[in-house]
């Protein structure tokens, strides 16, 4: 259920950006989501619809872009595509704790009308 808190955060950013642009209405919100992030886009959509009622962003469409995950092994100096957030290097099998990308979630841009 952590989508609720995340969606609150997204909505705050969207409203701040819309006010900065002097917009009266937000038509689209482009959200970038990492392939391995644990956020469910449908849950975010659901909360966004609920939370945005009566705000500038009411009725805005959420457009999700997925970023492919990527991990890096320092020992072998290789980049590879991980299938989970906790992976081992395919070459040396040592644990690779840090993903260079793939777990992010942020507002990329908004369209106002
Ligand atoms: Zn390695």
Image: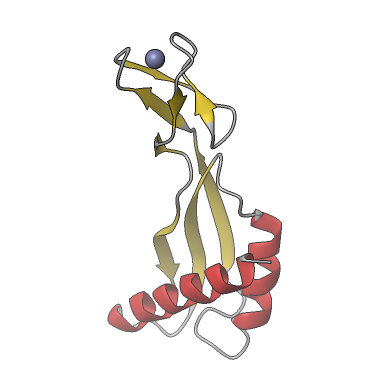
At 53% from the left edge and 28% from the top edge, which residue is drawn?
Answer: 87
Q: Residue 40: x percent and y percent?
A: 66, 54
In this orientation, which residue lies closer to the viewer: 110 or 38? 38
The answer, for residue 113, to whether it is visible in the render is no
At 45% from the left edge and 8% from the top edge, which residue is drawn?
Answer: 91
> Which part of the image, by quadrant, shows the C terminus?
bottom left
Ligand 1 is in which quadrant of the figure? top left
Q: Residue 60: x percent and y percent?
A: 57, 71
> Which part of the image, by quadrant, shows the N terminus?
bottom right
Q: Residue 112: x percent and y percent?
A: 42, 72
| Residue 53 in the figure: left or right of residue 18 | right
At 49% from the left edge and 15% from the top edge, which residue is drawn?
Answer: 93
Query: Which residue in the rendered view is the most extreme toward the front?
Result: 94
Quadrant assignment, res 72: top left
The answer, for residue 48, to whether it is visible in the render is yes
Quadrant assignment, res 84: top right
Please say if 94 is above or below 96: above
Which coloring applies here? secondary structure
The mark total stands at 0
Quadrant assignment, res 108: bottom left
């Amino acid at each position: 259920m952590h989508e609720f808190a995340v969606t609150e955060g997204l909505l705050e950013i969207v409203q701040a950006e819309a006010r900065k642009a002097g917009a009266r209405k937000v038509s689209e919100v482009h959200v970038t989501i990492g392939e391995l992030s644990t956020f469910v886009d449908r849950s975010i959509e659901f909360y966004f619809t609920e939370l945005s009622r009566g705000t500038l962003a009411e009725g805005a469409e959420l457009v999700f872009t997925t970023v492919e995950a990527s991990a890096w092994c320092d020992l072998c100096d290789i980049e590879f595509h991980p299938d989970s957030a906790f992976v081992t290097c395919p070459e040396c099998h040592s644990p690779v704790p840090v993903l260079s990308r793939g777990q992010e979630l942020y507002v990329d841009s908004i369209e106002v009308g």
